[in-house]
């Protein structure tokens, strides 16, 4: 069962030093999705040893993978693997991150813009709360931070 992204933003941004955040958040891969992805991987890479899947399952838990991230990582691996056999790192390394900004960072980026360009620039961003702090992301990604 996946956890809602908002519940895990705090742990994703310890100290608010991060400037990127995963679109997947943290969670736990369901047995159904794990089974589907293992079947897909076995069909695509039949020479992988059975131990590969045991280690993969353990590391997916440790890395707090979500169902969506495992599905996307599996499909990406099948489409892009350039070696005869993939590694677990090929799956664990898959992520989609977005840039998050402070108000000061956006103000600094747009300080040399004219009034109309500055308004267009700021209109692209929406505010989100992370650990009770305001941060800004492109509006196209805001749905990841709301229920």
Image: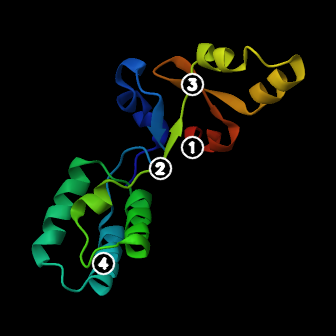
Q: Distance between the residues labelled 2 and 4?
A: 21 Å
Q: How far apart are marks 1 and 3 (CA)?
A: 16 Å
Other-residue count near label 1 (Cα within 10 Å), few / some / many at <14 / 14–19 / ≥20: some
SS at badge 2: loop
Marks 1 and 3, the one that precedes in the sequence: 3
SS at badge 4: helix
Q: Quadrant of the C terminus?
A: top right
Position of 11 compared to 21: left or right? Answer: left
Marks 2 and 4, the one that precedes in the sequence: 4
Vertical order, 68 against 111 (above or below): below
Q: Distance between the residues labelled 2 and 3?
A: 17 Å
SS at badge 1: helix
Marks 1 and 4, the one that precedes in the sequence: 4
Residue to which mark 3 is pinned: 101
Residue to which mark 4 is pinned: 41
Position of 36 compared to 55: left or right? Answer: right
Position of 62 compared to 76: left or right? Answer: left
Q: Position of residue 16 (x, y in %)?
A: 42, 20
Residue to which mark 2 is pinned: 96
Residue to which mark 1 is pinned: 144
Q: Position of residue 69 (x, y in %)?
A: 41, 57
Q: Quadrant of the N terminus?
A: bottom left
The label nearer to you, 1 versus 4, is 4
Q: Which color scheme did the rendering employ for the protein? A: rainbow
- Image point (40%, 46%), residue name: 3
The label nearer to you, 1 versus 3, is 3
Other-residue count near label 4 (Cα within 10 Å), few / some / many at <14 / 14–19 / ≥20: some
Marks 1 and 2, the one that precedes in the sequence: 2
């Amino acid at each position: 069962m996946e956890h809602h992204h908002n519940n895990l933003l705090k742990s994703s941004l310890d100290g608010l030093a991060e400037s990127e955040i995963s679109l997947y958040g943290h969670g736990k891969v369901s047995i159904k999705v794990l089974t589907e992805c293992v079947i897909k991987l076995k069909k695509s890479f039949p020479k992988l040893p059975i131990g590969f899947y045991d280690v993969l399952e353990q590391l997916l838990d440790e890395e707090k993978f979500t169902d969506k991230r495992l599905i996307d990582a599996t499909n990406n691996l099948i489409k892009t693997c350039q070696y005869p056999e993939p590694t677990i790192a090929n799956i664990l390394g898959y992520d989609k991150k977005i840039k998050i900004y402070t108000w000061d960072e956006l103000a600094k980026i747009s300080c040399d813009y004219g009034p109309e360009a500055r308004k267009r620039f700021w209109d692209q961003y929406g505010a989100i709360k992370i650990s009770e702090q305001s941060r800004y992301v492109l509006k196209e990604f805001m749905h990841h931070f709301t229920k």
